[in-house]
Amino acid sequence: MALIDLIFAKKFSRELTAAQLREFAAAAADPATPDYQLAAMLMAIRLNGMTERETAELALAMAQTGDMLSPEVDGVPVDKHSTGGVGDTTTLVLVPLVAACGGKVVKMSGRGLGHTGGTIDKLESIPGFRTELPETDFLRIVREVGCCVVGQTGELAPADKRLYSLRDVTSTVDSIALIASSIMSKKLAGGARGIVLDVKLGSGALMKTMEDTLALARLMCAIGRHSGRQMAALITGMDEPLGSQVGNALEVEEAIRVLSGQVTGPLLTVSLALGAQMLVLGGNAPDEQAARMMLEAALREGRGLDRFRRMIAAQGGDARVCDNPGLLPQAAVKTPLLARGDAYLAGINTESAGLAAQALGAGRMRKEDAIDPSAGYILRKRVGDYVREGEVIAVLHHSAAAPVQKAADMLRGALAFSAQKPSKQALIRARIAPDGKETYENDL
Ligand code: URA
Ligand code: CA
Protein backbone atom coordinates (compact mmCIF):
# COMPACT_ATOMS: atom_id res chain seq x y z
CA MET A 1 0.00 0.00 0.00
CA ALA A 2 1.28 3.46 -0.82
CA LEU A 3 1.62 6.01 1.98
CA ILE A 4 -1.15 8.11 0.42
CA ASP A 5 -3.57 5.22 0.95
CA LEU A 6 -2.65 5.05 4.62
CA ILE A 7 -3.17 8.81 4.94
CA PHE A 8 -6.54 8.40 3.19
CA ALA A 9 -7.57 5.66 5.63
CA LYS A 10 -6.57 7.64 8.71
CA LYS A 11 -8.27 10.77 7.31
CA PHE A 12 -11.53 8.81 7.62
CA SER A 13 -10.57 7.48 11.09
CA ARG A 14 -10.13 3.93 9.86
CA GLU A 15 -8.15 1.55 12.03
CA LEU A 16 -4.83 0.53 10.51
CA THR A 17 -3.59 -3.05 10.58
CA ALA A 18 -0.24 -4.05 12.06
CA ALA A 19 1.12 -4.48 8.52
CA GLN A 20 -0.01 -0.98 7.55
CA LEU A 21 1.56 0.51 10.66
CA ARG A 22 4.80 -1.27 9.81
CA GLU A 23 4.65 0.30 6.35
CA PHE A 24 4.16 3.74 7.88
CA ALA A 25 7.08 3.23 10.29
CA ALA A 26 9.30 1.98 7.47
CA ALA A 27 8.34 5.00 5.35
CA ALA A 28 9.24 7.30 8.26
CA ALA A 29 12.68 5.71 8.54
CA ASP A 30 13.26 5.96 4.76
CA PRO A 31 14.99 9.25 3.86
CA ALA A 32 13.35 9.08 0.40
CA THR A 33 9.87 9.57 1.91
CA PRO A 34 8.83 13.22 1.58
CA ASP A 35 8.25 15.17 4.80
CA TYR A 36 4.84 16.38 3.55
CA GLN A 37 3.38 12.89 3.43
CA LEU A 38 4.64 12.04 6.91
CA ALA A 39 3.35 15.39 8.18
CA ALA A 40 -0.10 14.75 6.69
CA MET A 41 -0.22 11.33 8.34
CA LEU A 42 0.85 12.77 11.70
CA MET A 43 -1.92 15.37 11.53
CA ALA A 44 -4.49 12.71 10.60
CA ILE A 45 -3.39 10.71 13.65
CA ARG A 46 -3.38 13.80 15.85
CA LEU A 47 -6.94 14.68 14.82
CA ASN A 48 -8.50 11.21 14.57
CA GLY A 49 -6.47 9.28 17.13
CA MET A 50 -5.46 5.66 17.24
CA THR A 51 -6.75 2.72 19.23
CA GLU A 52 -4.61 1.17 21.95
CA ARG A 53 -3.81 -1.72 19.62
CA GLU A 54 -2.74 0.61 16.80
CA THR A 55 -0.59 2.63 19.19
CA ALA A 56 1.12 -0.51 20.50
CA GLU A 57 1.73 -1.83 16.97
CA LEU A 58 3.12 1.53 15.85
CA ALA A 59 5.51 1.71 18.82
CA LEU A 60 6.85 -1.77 18.08
CA ALA A 61 7.06 -1.05 14.34
CA MET A 62 9.03 2.16 15.01
CA ALA A 63 11.36 0.26 17.34
CA GLN A 64 11.94 -2.35 14.65
CA THR A 65 13.11 0.27 12.12
CA GLY A 66 16.46 0.26 13.97
CA ASP A 67 18.59 -1.79 16.34
CA MET A 68 16.72 -3.92 18.86
CA LEU A 69 19.01 -4.64 21.81
CA SER A 70 18.54 -7.82 23.78
CA PRO A 71 20.93 -7.46 26.69
CA GLU A 72 22.43 -10.72 27.90
CA VAL A 73 22.80 -10.13 31.61
CA ASP A 74 22.48 -12.35 34.62
CA GLY A 75 18.93 -11.40 35.58
CA VAL A 76 16.09 -9.33 34.17
CA PRO A 77 17.36 -6.12 32.57
CA VAL A 78 15.35 -3.16 33.87
CA ASP A 79 15.00 0.46 32.78
CA LYS A 80 13.16 3.52 34.04
CA HIS A 81 11.75 6.42 32.06
CA SER A 82 10.61 9.82 33.28
CA THR A 83 8.41 11.96 31.07
CA GLY A 84 10.61 14.85 32.13
CA GLY A 85 10.77 17.41 34.86
CA VAL A 86 12.86 20.08 36.55
CA GLY A 87 15.47 19.18 39.16
CA ASP A 88 14.42 15.61 38.40
CA THR A 89 17.59 13.63 39.11
CA THR A 90 15.99 10.37 40.22
CA THR A 91 18.03 8.39 37.67
CA LEU A 92 21.35 9.32 39.28
CA VAL A 93 20.04 8.33 42.70
CA LEU A 94 18.13 5.16 41.90
CA VAL A 95 20.30 3.54 39.22
CA PRO A 96 23.25 2.85 41.58
CA LEU A 97 20.94 1.99 44.49
CA VAL A 98 19.02 -0.57 42.41
CA ALA A 99 22.32 -2.04 41.16
CA ALA A 100 23.56 -2.27 44.75
CA CYS A 101 20.49 -4.41 45.50
CA GLY A 102 21.18 -6.84 42.65
CA GLY A 103 19.21 -5.14 39.85
CA LYS A 104 20.62 -5.03 36.31
CA VAL A 105 19.98 -1.54 35.01
CA VAL A 106 20.30 -0.94 31.27
CA LYS A 107 19.55 2.75 31.20
CA MET A 108 19.17 4.72 28.00
CA SER A 109 18.72 8.42 28.62
CA GLY A 110 18.18 11.58 26.65
CA ARG A 111 19.47 15.13 26.60
CA GLY A 112 17.63 18.11 27.98
CA LEU A 113 15.30 20.06 25.74
CA GLY A 114 13.17 23.11 26.52
CA HIS A 115 12.51 23.49 30.24
CA THR A 116 13.45 19.92 31.21
CA GLY A 117 16.91 18.61 31.97
CA GLY A 118 18.42 15.43 30.57
CA THR A 119 20.40 12.77 32.37
CA ILE A 120 23.03 12.56 29.62
CA ASP A 121 23.89 16.26 29.98
CA LYS A 122 24.08 15.84 33.75
CA LEU A 123 26.45 12.87 33.57
CA GLU A 124 28.63 14.61 30.99
CA SER A 125 29.33 17.34 33.54
CA ILE A 126 31.49 14.74 35.33
CA PRO A 127 35.02 15.17 33.88
CA GLY A 128 35.80 12.37 31.42
CA PHE A 129 32.40 10.66 31.65
CA ARG A 130 31.44 8.90 28.40
CA THR A 131 27.79 8.44 27.46
CA GLU A 132 28.45 7.05 23.98
CA LEU A 133 29.74 3.52 24.33
CA PRO A 134 29.80 0.55 21.97
CA GLU A 135 27.05 -1.90 22.84
CA THR A 136 29.62 -4.49 23.99
CA ASP A 137 31.06 -2.05 26.56
CA PHE A 138 27.57 -1.03 27.69
CA LEU A 139 26.64 -4.65 28.41
CA ARG A 140 30.01 -5.50 29.97
CA ILE A 141 29.62 -2.61 32.43
CA VAL A 142 26.07 -3.73 33.28
CA ARG A 143 27.41 -7.22 33.97
CA GLU A 144 30.36 -5.96 36.06
CA VAL A 145 28.83 -3.03 37.92
CA GLY A 146 25.11 -3.77 37.67
CA CYS A 147 24.30 -0.54 35.86
CA CYS A 148 25.32 1.67 32.96
CA VAL A 149 23.72 4.85 31.60
CA VAL A 150 24.20 5.73 27.95
CA GLY A 151 22.63 8.08 25.41
CA GLN A 152 20.20 6.89 22.78
CA THR A 153 22.03 6.28 19.54
CA GLY A 154 20.81 7.22 16.06
CA GLU A 155 20.14 3.57 15.26
CA LEU A 156 17.56 3.34 18.02
CA ALA A 157 14.06 3.82 16.53
CA PRO A 158 15.12 5.99 13.55
CA ALA A 159 11.45 6.27 12.51
CA ASP A 160 10.71 8.05 15.78
CA LYS A 161 13.67 10.39 15.32
CA ARG A 162 12.26 11.56 11.98
CA LEU A 163 8.65 11.78 13.18
CA TYR A 164 9.54 13.55 16.43
CA SER A 165 11.36 16.33 14.59
CA LEU A 166 8.43 16.71 12.18
CA ARG A 167 5.91 16.81 15.03
CA ASP A 168 7.81 19.68 16.52
CA VAL A 169 7.16 21.85 13.46
CA THR A 170 3.65 20.64 12.55
CA SER A 171 1.87 21.17 15.89
CA THR A 172 1.41 17.44 16.38
CA VAL A 173 3.41 16.89 19.57
CA ASP A 174 0.29 16.98 21.76
CA SER A 175 -1.19 13.63 20.83
CA ILE A 176 -1.23 11.08 23.64
CA ALA A 177 -1.01 8.23 21.09
CA LEU A 178 2.00 9.83 19.38
CA ILE A 179 3.74 10.68 22.66
CA ALA A 180 3.21 7.18 24.06
CA SER A 181 4.35 5.40 20.88
CA SER A 182 7.35 7.73 20.54
CA ILE A 183 8.60 7.19 24.09
CA MET A 184 7.89 3.48 24.09
CA SER A 185 9.50 2.81 20.69
CA LYS A 186 12.84 3.82 22.21
CA LYS A 187 12.24 1.86 25.41
CA LEU A 188 11.31 -1.29 23.47
CA ALA A 189 14.42 -0.97 21.29
CA GLY A 190 16.55 -0.49 24.42
CA GLY A 191 15.85 -4.09 25.32
CA ALA A 192 14.80 -3.85 28.98
CA ARG A 193 12.39 -6.60 30.01
CA GLY A 194 11.04 -4.60 32.95
CA ILE A 195 10.26 -0.92 32.49
CA VAL A 196 9.19 1.51 35.21
CA LEU A 197 7.57 4.75 34.10
CA ASP A 198 7.63 7.99 36.09
CA VAL A 199 4.83 9.98 34.53
CA LYS A 200 4.96 13.53 35.79
CA LEU A 201 1.91 15.63 36.63
CA GLY A 202 1.86 19.35 37.30
CA SER A 203 3.06 22.76 36.19
CA GLY A 204 6.43 21.43 35.04
CA ALA A 205 5.10 18.29 33.34
CA LEU A 206 4.25 17.31 29.78
CA MET A 207 0.71 16.61 31.01
CA LYS A 208 -1.03 19.09 33.27
CA THR A 209 -4.16 17.16 34.35
CA MET A 210 -4.58 13.89 36.24
CA GLU A 211 -6.90 12.60 33.51
CA ASP A 212 -4.35 13.09 30.70
CA THR A 213 -1.48 11.86 32.84
CA LEU A 214 -3.29 8.64 33.73
CA ALA A 215 -4.28 8.13 30.10
CA LEU A 216 -0.65 8.49 29.01
CA ALA A 217 0.60 6.16 31.75
CA ARG A 218 -2.03 3.50 30.95
CA LEU A 219 -1.27 3.66 27.26
CA MET A 220 2.50 3.35 27.74
CA CYS A 221 2.01 0.36 30.06
CA ALA A 222 -0.30 -1.27 27.49
CA ILE A 223 2.28 -0.73 24.72
CA GLY A 224 5.00 -2.39 26.79
CA ARG A 225 2.82 -5.34 27.76
CA HIS A 226 1.83 -5.80 24.10
CA SER A 227 5.53 -6.42 23.38
CA GLY A 228 5.98 -8.78 26.31
CA ARG A 229 7.60 -6.32 28.71
CA GLN A 230 6.74 -6.09 32.39
CA MET A 231 5.49 -2.60 33.13
CA ALA A 232 4.81 -0.47 36.19
CA ALA A 233 4.10 3.25 36.42
CA LEU A 234 4.00 5.92 39.08
CA ILE A 235 2.36 9.28 38.61
CA THR A 236 4.39 11.81 40.55
CA GLY A 237 4.06 15.51 41.22
CA MET A 238 6.00 18.13 39.27
CA ASP A 239 4.54 21.22 40.94
CA GLU A 240 7.98 22.36 42.07
CA PRO A 241 11.48 21.21 41.14
CA LEU A 242 11.96 17.73 42.61
CA GLY A 243 15.40 18.39 44.04
CA SER A 244 16.63 21.73 45.36
CA GLN A 245 19.37 22.06 42.77
CA VAL A 246 18.59 22.70 39.12
CA GLY A 247 21.32 22.50 36.48
CA ASN A 248 23.65 19.76 35.29
CA ALA A 249 26.66 19.67 37.65
CA LEU A 250 24.44 21.01 40.43
CA GLU A 251 22.10 18.01 40.04
CA VAL A 252 24.99 15.55 40.02
CA GLU A 253 26.18 17.14 43.24
CA GLU A 254 22.73 16.84 44.80
CA ALA A 255 22.48 13.18 43.77
CA ILE A 256 25.84 12.54 45.46
CA ARG A 257 24.60 14.28 48.61
CA VAL A 258 21.46 12.10 48.58
CA LEU A 259 23.49 8.92 48.04
CA SER A 260 25.83 9.85 50.87
CA GLY A 261 22.90 10.34 53.23
CA GLN A 262 23.33 14.09 53.65
CA VAL A 263 20.07 15.07 51.92
CA THR A 264 16.55 13.63 52.11
CA GLY A 265 13.28 14.99 50.74
CA PRO A 266 11.17 14.62 47.60
CA LEU A 267 14.07 13.59 45.33
CA LEU A 268 14.91 10.67 47.60
CA THR A 269 11.24 9.78 48.16
CA VAL A 270 10.49 9.47 44.45
CA SER A 271 13.80 7.70 43.75
CA LEU A 272 13.05 5.04 46.38
CA ALA A 273 9.48 4.56 45.12
CA LEU A 274 10.65 4.07 41.53
CA GLY A 275 13.64 1.97 42.54
CA ALA A 276 11.37 -0.36 44.52
CA GLN A 277 9.25 -0.96 41.40
CA MET A 278 12.43 -1.76 39.44
CA LEU A 279 13.57 -4.34 41.99
CA VAL A 280 10.16 -6.01 41.92
CA LEU A 281 10.07 -6.13 38.08
CA GLY A 282 13.66 -7.39 38.07
CA GLY A 283 12.73 -10.23 40.40
CA ASN A 284 15.21 -8.99 43.02
CA ALA A 285 12.54 -8.47 45.68
CA PRO A 286 9.27 -10.31 46.36
CA ASP A 287 7.25 -7.12 46.87
CA GLU A 288 7.45 -3.36 47.14
CA GLN A 289 7.84 -3.37 50.92
CA ALA A 290 10.84 -5.71 50.81
CA ALA A 291 12.33 -3.78 47.89
CA ARG A 292 12.12 -0.53 49.79
CA MET A 293 13.89 -2.02 52.81
CA MET A 294 16.67 -3.30 50.57
CA LEU A 295 17.11 0.16 49.01
CA GLU A 296 17.11 1.88 52.39
CA ALA A 297 19.76 -0.52 53.69
CA ALA A 298 21.92 0.08 50.60
CA LEU A 299 21.59 3.82 51.11
CA ARG A 300 22.41 3.63 54.82
CA GLU A 301 25.47 1.47 54.21
CA GLY A 302 26.82 3.72 51.45
CA ARG A 303 26.53 0.96 48.86
CA GLY A 304 24.60 3.19 46.43
CA LEU A 305 27.36 5.81 46.43
CA ASP A 306 29.93 3.04 46.02
CA ARG A 307 28.10 1.76 42.92
CA PHE A 308 27.93 5.28 41.55
CA ARG A 309 31.73 5.57 41.96
CA ARG A 310 32.21 2.28 40.13
CA MET A 311 29.82 3.22 37.33
CA ILE A 312 31.51 6.60 36.83
CA ALA A 313 34.96 4.97 36.72
CA ALA A 314 33.75 2.26 34.29
CA GLN A 315 32.39 4.98 32.00
CA GLY A 316 35.67 6.89 31.98
CA GLY A 317 34.68 9.58 34.47
CA ASP A 318 36.53 11.00 37.47
CA ALA A 319 34.96 9.06 40.35
CA ARG A 320 36.64 11.36 42.87
CA VAL A 321 33.66 13.72 42.37
CA CYS A 322 31.74 11.42 44.73
CA ASP A 323 34.02 12.43 47.61
CA ASN A 324 34.88 15.89 46.37
CA PRO A 325 32.02 17.47 44.37
CA GLY A 326 34.23 20.55 44.06
CA LEU A 327 35.85 18.70 41.14
CA LEU A 328 32.63 19.22 39.14
CA PRO A 329 32.43 22.34 36.93
CA GLN A 330 31.96 25.40 39.13
CA ALA A 331 30.15 28.60 38.12
CA ALA A 332 32.22 31.78 38.04
CA VAL A 333 29.45 33.93 39.51
CA LYS A 334 26.80 33.30 42.16
CA THR A 335 23.90 35.74 42.39
CA PRO A 336 21.32 35.54 45.19
CA LEU A 337 17.62 36.09 44.53
CA LEU A 338 16.18 37.94 47.53
CA ALA A 339 12.60 37.97 48.82
CA ARG A 340 10.81 41.31 48.46
CA GLY A 341 8.33 40.75 51.29
CA ASP A 342 7.11 38.40 54.03
CA ALA A 343 4.90 35.53 52.79
CA TYR A 344 4.59 31.84 52.22
CA LEU A 345 6.02 30.45 49.02
CA ALA A 346 2.68 29.17 47.75
CA GLY A 347 3.55 27.67 44.38
CA ILE A 348 6.08 27.48 41.58
CA ASN A 349 5.33 27.50 37.89
CA THR A 350 7.82 24.75 37.33
CA GLU A 351 7.97 25.04 33.55
CA SER A 352 8.99 28.71 33.93
CA ALA A 353 11.46 27.75 36.65
CA GLY A 354 13.00 25.26 34.22
CA LEU A 355 13.20 27.92 31.53
CA ALA A 356 15.02 30.22 33.98
CA ALA A 357 17.72 27.55 34.39
CA GLN A 358 17.88 27.18 30.63
CA ALA A 359 18.35 30.95 30.25
CA LEU A 360 21.35 30.75 32.60
CA GLY A 361 22.90 28.22 30.20
CA ALA A 362 21.82 24.95 31.83
CA GLY A 363 19.57 23.90 28.96
CA ARG A 364 19.01 24.29 25.28
CA MET A 365 16.24 25.71 23.14
CA ARG A 366 17.35 23.87 20.01
CA LYS A 367 18.98 20.46 19.87
CA GLU A 368 22.26 21.90 18.57
CA ASP A 369 22.68 24.55 21.31
CA ALA A 370 25.68 24.31 23.66
CA ILE A 371 25.15 24.23 27.41
CA ASP A 372 27.12 25.43 30.44
CA PRO A 373 27.45 22.43 32.78
CA SER A 374 28.02 24.66 35.82
CA ALA A 375 24.92 26.84 35.28
CA GLY A 376 21.65 26.64 37.20
CA TYR A 377 20.44 27.52 40.67
CA ILE A 378 20.02 26.24 44.19
CA LEU A 379 16.60 26.76 45.74
CA ARG A 380 16.81 27.63 49.41
CA LYS A 381 13.02 27.59 49.87
CA ARG A 382 10.38 25.06 48.92
CA VAL A 383 6.64 25.42 48.48
CA GLY A 384 5.08 25.82 51.93
CA ASP A 385 8.10 27.60 53.45
CA TYR A 386 7.68 31.02 55.03
CA VAL A 387 9.98 33.63 53.51
CA ARG A 388 11.00 36.93 55.10
CA GLU A 389 11.89 40.08 53.21
CA GLY A 390 15.57 40.06 52.25
CA GLU A 391 15.97 36.31 52.73
CA VAL A 392 17.70 34.33 50.01
CA ILE A 393 15.14 32.33 47.98
CA ALA A 394 17.65 30.96 45.49
CA VAL A 395 21.28 31.32 44.45
CA LEU A 396 21.86 31.55 40.71
CA HIS A 397 25.03 29.94 39.35
CA HIS A 398 26.25 31.28 36.02
CA SER A 399 29.05 32.61 33.86
CA ALA A 400 29.90 36.30 33.64
CA ALA A 401 28.30 36.41 30.18
CA ALA A 402 24.94 34.84 31.15
CA PRO A 403 21.79 37.01 31.04
CA VAL A 404 21.40 36.83 34.82
CA GLN A 405 18.88 39.67 35.14
CA LYS A 406 16.55 38.01 32.64
CA ALA A 407 16.91 34.62 34.33
CA ALA A 408 16.36 36.10 37.79
CA ASP A 409 13.20 37.85 36.55
CA MET A 410 11.98 34.58 35.04
CA LEU A 411 12.60 32.66 38.24
CA ARG A 412 10.95 35.37 40.37
CA GLY A 413 8.02 35.41 37.95
CA ALA A 414 7.64 31.65 38.44
CA LEU A 415 7.12 32.03 42.20
CA ALA A 416 3.70 32.65 43.78
CA PHE A 417 3.45 34.02 47.34
CA SER A 418 0.56 34.00 49.77
CA ALA A 419 -0.24 35.14 53.32
CA GLN A 420 -1.85 31.73 53.93
CA LYS A 421 0.10 28.53 54.29
CA PRO A 422 -0.60 26.56 51.12
CA SER A 423 -1.75 22.96 51.29
CA LYS A 424 0.80 20.54 49.89
CA GLN A 425 -0.08 18.01 47.21
CA ALA A 426 0.93 14.38 47.62
CA LEU A 427 4.15 13.57 45.81
CA ILE A 428 3.06 10.13 44.59
CA ARG A 429 -0.39 10.45 43.09
CA ALA A 430 -1.03 7.04 41.60
CA ARG A 431 0.51 3.71 40.78
CA ILE A 432 -0.18 1.26 37.97
CA ALA A 433 0.95 -2.25 38.93
CA PRO A 434 2.30 -4.82 36.44
CA ASP A 435 -1.17 -6.42 36.24
CA GLY A 436 -2.70 -3.04 35.40
CA LYS A 437 -4.26 -2.51 38.82
CA GLU A 438 -4.43 1.16 39.74
CA THR A 439 -4.01 2.64 43.21
CA TYR A 440 -4.55 6.33 43.96
CA GLU A 441 -2.80 8.65 46.39
CA ASN A 442 -4.97 8.13 49.49
CA ASP A 443 -4.33 4.39 49.36
CA LEU A 444 -0.62 4.55 48.64
N1 URA B 1 9.41 12.41 24.59
C1 URA B 1 9.49 11.63 23.49
O1 URA B 1 10.45 10.90 23.32
N2 URA B 1 8.51 11.68 22.59
C2 URA B 1 7.44 12.47 22.73
O2 URA B 1 6.58 12.46 21.88
C3 URA B 1 7.34 13.29 23.86
C4 URA B 1 8.36 13.23 24.78
CA1 CA C 1 23.73 0.31 17.90
Image (tube, helix red, strand yellow):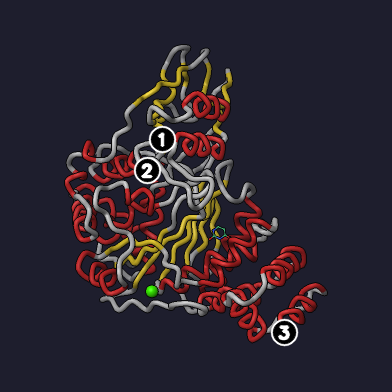
| Amino acid identity at mark 3 | Ala
Q: Which mark is residue 376?
A: 1
Q: Secondary structure under badge 1?
A: strand
Q: Position of residue 82 (x, y in %)?
A: 47, 55
Instruction: Name the residue tied to disc 2.
Output: 248
Q: CA distance from mark 2 to mark 1?
A: 7 Å
Which residue corresponds to mark 3? 2
Q: Give the amino acid type for the residue marked by disc 2 in the picture.
A: Asn
- Residue found at x 47% / y 18%: 387
- Mark closer to the chain start, 1 or 3: 3
206 sits to left or right of 8: left
Q: Quadrant of residue 192?
A: bottom left
Instruction: Specify the amino acid type for callout 1.
Output: Gly
Local secondary structure at mark 3: loop
- Please provide percent x and percent y for residue 114: 53, 46
Q: Which quadrant of the figure shows ligand 2?
A: bottom left
Q: Nearer the viewer, residue 12 or 346?
A: 12
Question: Separation of disc 2 and disc 3 at Cα?
Answer: 45 Å
- Within 10 angstroms of label 2, few (less than 14), some, or many (20 or more) residues? many
Q: From the viewer's side, name the closer residue of 271 and 392.
A: 392
- The answer to whether marks 2 and 1 mark residues whose Cβ atoms lie closer than 8 Å is yes
Image quadrant assignment for residue 98: bottom left
For this rendering, which residue is in front, 422 or 95? 95
Asked if the residue at tag 3 contacts the one at tag 1, i.e. Cβ–Cβ closer than 8 Å, the answer is no
Residue positioned 53% across, 49% down in the render? 366
User: Is there any visible trace of residue 441 in the rendered image?
Assistant: no
In this rendering, position of residue 116 left or right of residue 293: right
